[in-house]
Amino acid sequence: MFFIVLEGKLVCIKNKEVSTITIGSCIGFSALRENTVRDCSIKTKSDCKLLCLYGEVYRNAIEAYEEKGMEERIEFIRKISIFSNY
């Protein structure tokens, strides 16, 4: 799953506390992007509200975002006269 922190504070732990995770931060994208297991544990330091997406929903959203970006880049390139025939 992919999580976005809406409220609260969490910590990332890899044998020791590594980093603090705060509002606006995302968790889980590396494991989803690379289709691997998570490489750390997450614990809350306060009450939290998280927005969570299942892996498939996250991947579909990223794919749609990347497609849109690709279309915009292609359109930009087509506006350059040397590439206008492509």
Image (cartoon, helix red, strand yellow):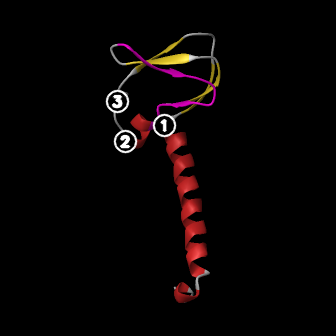
| Residue under label 1 | 55
Q: Which amino acid does label 1 sit on?
A: Gly
Q: Position of residue 20 (x, y in %)?
A: 51, 20
Work out whether mark 1 precedes mark 3 in sequence or the reverse, and give the earlier one.
Answer: 3
* The magenta stretch spans residue 24: yes
Q: What residue type is labelled 3?
A: Val
Q: Where is residue 62 in the image (x, y as percent from the top left)?
A: 53, 48
| Residue under label 2 | 34
Badge 3: few (under 14), some or many (20 or more) residues near its Cα, within 10 Å?
few
**Horizontal side of residue 62 vs 49, given as left or right:** left
Q: Of residues 60 and 51, which is closer to you in this image?
A: 51
* The magenta stretch spans residue 17: yes
Give the residues drawn in magenta, as a range.
16-29
**Horizontal side of residue 35 vs 11, given as left or right:** left
Q: Can residue 2 be seen in this view?
A: no
Residue under the point 58% across and 80% down: 78
| Residue under label 3 | 37
